[in-house]
Image: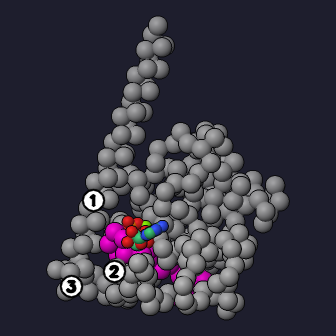
């Protein structure tokens, strides 16, 4: 099977591009191709005008391309701070890595967790750690695969602010994939829609919203249904985190009583 066909995507520094589409549309596959985790059977990948199609992921990373993964990928035994510092090491010295980690932990409201093993954090917080790690390398382009999944609703707005500041302060290009349509419409300068491995539409958030309204029978329902499914799943995960936390607190309180 072909996961993607005839897809062209351009990302410039200083812009946020949103990539949306239903489950299995090929969004992760596209990120994998751009970052070198998959190879295209035809076509080329260029980074700042250089053909990098044959480059492996570390070489692309070194040239300024960073990513986050759809499924976690934090070093669970390492502390939150160490996870973030790791993102900077290799491109910066230890002192600079520490400085960047401190800045990013503050920006992402992760300071209170900085000493904890990353694996003990709730789902959504672990994704923030992964985002901070990617940003610590000060990439010129960063591709994020569902970074806001599992974030409590109250964290979405600050997260949107962070995405914008990556564009405005670091002048990096951001490609973001997420099923949270409110977030996508808010942060994206333009949006690309994939469906079944093909580019279906592109435009400003307003244009895409109108497009979705018009094409609701086809695209809208599948995207919105998926959005609903993911949101329900996020809520379940957050509720589960809450339950575990409450249980921990109960056990601690019991220990203290005993
Ligand atoms: N390693 C693989 N081997 C075979 N098929 C794959 C593989 N990875 C993805 N696919 C298929 O390629 C298509 C695109 O998958 P992809 O993961 O890129 O979708 P997606 O848009 O990221 O979906 P989601 O929103 O669920 O993350 C799907 O049909 C998927 O089943
Ligand atoms: Mg995916």
Q: Residue 223: within the magenta?
A: no
State which region is magenta: 10-27
For label 3, the SS is loop
For label 2, the SS is strand
In the image, residue 227 above or below residue 123? below
Spot occupied by residue 250 in the image (x, y as percentages of width and height) = 40, 22
Pointer 3: what residue?
Answer: 215
Q: Residue drawn at (59%, 89%), measured in percent from left and top?
A: 44
Q: Residue drawn at (60%, 44%), measured in percent from left and top?
A: 76
Pointer 1: what residue?
Answer: 229
For label 1, the SS is helix
Q: Earlier in the sequence, mark 2 or mark 3?
A: 2
Residue at the front extreme of this rendering: 1
Q: How many marks?
A: 3
Spot occupied by residue 79 in the image (x, y as percentages of width and height) = 65, 43
Disc 2 vs disc 3: Cβ atoms closer than 8 Å? no
**How far apart are labels 1 and 2 at the CA level?**
17 Å
Spot occupied by residue 13 in the image (x, y as percentages of width and height) = 60, 83
Q: Quadrant of ligand 1?
A: bottom left
Pointer 2: what residue?
Answer: 195
């Amino acid at each position: 099977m072909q996961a993607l066909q005839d897809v062209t995507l351009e990302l410039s520094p200083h812009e946020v591009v949103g990539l949306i589409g239903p489950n299995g549309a090929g969004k992760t596959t596209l990120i994998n191709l751009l970052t070198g985790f998959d190879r295209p059977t035809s076509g080329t990948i260029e980074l700042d005008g250089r053909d990098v199609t044959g480059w492996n992921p570390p070489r692309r990373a070194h040239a300024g391309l960073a990513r986050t993964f759809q499924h976690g990928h934090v070093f669970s035994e390492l502390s939150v701070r160490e996870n973030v510092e790791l993102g900077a090491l290799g491109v910066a010295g230890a002192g600079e890595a520490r400085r960047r980690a401190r800045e990013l932990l503050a920006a992402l409201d992760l300071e209170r967790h900085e000493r904890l093993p990353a694996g003990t954090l709730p789902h959504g917080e672990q994704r923030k750690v992964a985002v901070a790690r990617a940003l610590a390398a000060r990439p010129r382009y960063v591709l994020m695969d569902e970074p806001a999944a599992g974030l409590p609703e109250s964290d979405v707005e600050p997260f949107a602010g962070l995405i914008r500041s990556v564009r405005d302060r670091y002048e990096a290009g951001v490609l973001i994939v997420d099923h949270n349509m409110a977030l996508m419409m808010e942060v994206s300068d333009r949006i690309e829609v994939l469906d079944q491995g093909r580019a279906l539409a592109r435009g400003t958030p307003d244009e895409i919203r109108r497009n979705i309204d018009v094409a609701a029978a086809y695209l809208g329902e599948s995207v919105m249904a998926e959005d609903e499914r993911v949101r329900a799943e996020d809520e379940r995960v957050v509720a589960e985190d809450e339950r575990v936390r409450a249980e921990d607190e109960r056990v601690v309180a019991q220990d203290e009583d005993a």
